[in-house]
Image: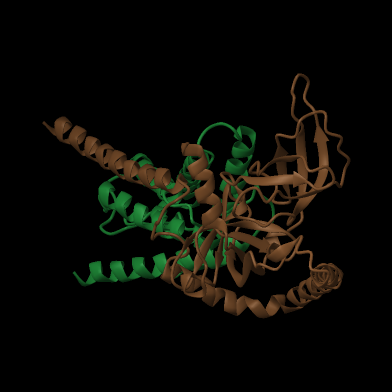
Chain colours: A brown, B green
Amino acid sequence: MRELVDFFVRFNALFFFILFEAICFFLIGQNNTYHRSSILNSSNAFVGSVFNFSNDMGNYFHLRTVNDSLIVENKLLRETLANSNINQNIVSQIRVDSIPVLGDSVITKKYIYYEASVINNSTNQLYNNITLNRGSNDGIKPEMGLVGANGVVGIIKSVSPNYSMAMSLLHKNAKISARIKKNDYTGTIIWNGQDARYAELQDIPKHVELIKNDVITTSGYSSIFPSDVIIGTIESFDLKEGSNFYKIKVRLASNFQKLRYVYAVENLNKEEQVDLELNAQDE
Amino acid sequence: MLRMNNIVVQLILRFLVLVLLQVLVLDNIELHHLVKPVIYPLFILLLPISFPSWLVMLIAMGLGLTIDAFNNTIGIHASACIFMAFCRPLFLRANTPRGGYEQNSFPSIEQFGLTRFLIYAGVLILLFHTFFYFVEAFGFRFLSNTILKIIISSFLSLLLILIHQMLFQKRK
């Protein structure tokens, strides 16, 4: 009888163990889908406010580095602005000549940038995520691209009124369409789950000529990122025997361990593009 | 009854301290991608011995989900916590002193002595990390990496737990 009770007690624990683990794995499974609305993540108001508080405390220690990075970014933007002025002169000249070759498409605003500060970020897991202090009240929506001062950072995954959570580029499931700037070959950037400084570029066929330090940018094919945002540079590449594709190691342009300020990018024509592509698939 | 209330208050306080320590301090330490020490499993290690295993597992799940919410890894920490909570009684039973445990005692260094506590904590922490990293990788794709992570992080976590215990368990 005693043994029977003992057995039941032990069986009891096992039963609860299986039940609880089943719940957990169900949650993990749900978390792996791209579209989701889970309350238990860092876009949750409570978790967000804890991170916000701790970020407020720590912010002062980073002011110098933030300043430096902003100056560098400013310089870059001024340079681009100076260059784009020339282009606009050309456009206006064309208009004066009453040849609307480029028309309105040049002027139309296609992307809106929202600034946000990073209140939580990790780089040493397989699923790294970034929490931002902006949410749906500020116009942030899921599936907006996230760009840092130096380059691509991630994709917004879920939003709450005041906070949002983004999948970092350093995420096992992250896949970003990329292009080699000099010859326009496109591939996919993935992260191999190891070093936060490097990612991997796939699907580049073996006949393409590569050199170290070739610049990799976004392709602009997906509706998430604008084209020509820098992702990184080629660190090394190698071609396995019998393989038709390179294995390319990319040094990421963004320093993920020091992310402070980022920009969420909204593509105003996104719905149009997605609808068009879906309709075309259906036919 | 008063004593029980005392224990509950103590547990809630310890829960808050360990979770905040984990989330606000330890999670921000990024030395290397293989290094990710944790201290919060200490909470499960130190739960009173008299708690039934289903309750320990339920608490472990709550703790794990809290940490998960901060890390955006829903379910991964929780499943490892539950696994650790499930294994805990096996080691407690093996360590039972003659005449059984005292009422309301919990597995601390004073209760076990340093060596036995080290074995108890070490094995459970190792099990925790093994489960955690295999669930995180969800397969054997990163096998060598996973094993390195398990060994290094287990060692560091155990070290942290020991330091924490040495610092805060000297009241008597």
Which residue lies most toward the top here? A242
Task: Residue at 37% x, 41% y: name it.
Answer: B87
- Residue furthest front as drawn: A98
Identify the image quadrant of the C terminus of chain B: bottom left
Q: Residue at x 30, y 52 (%)?
A: B58
> Where is residue B85 shown, x and y percent of the image?
36, 47
| Screen quadrant of the N terminus of chain B | bottom left
Q: In which quadrant of the rendered view does residue A104 lie?
A: bottom right
The residue positioned 56% from the left and 68% from the top of the image is A132
Left or right, residue B60 beside residue A171: left
Q: Which quadrant holds residue A10?
A: top left
- Residue nearest the viewer, comparing A268 with B151: A268
**Residue drawn at point x = 25 percent, y = 57 percent:** B103
The percent position of residue A109, horizontal first and vertical second, equals 65, 68
Residue B38 in view in this figure: no
Front residue of A278/A48: it is A278
Percent from the top left, x then y, of residue B106?
A: 35, 57
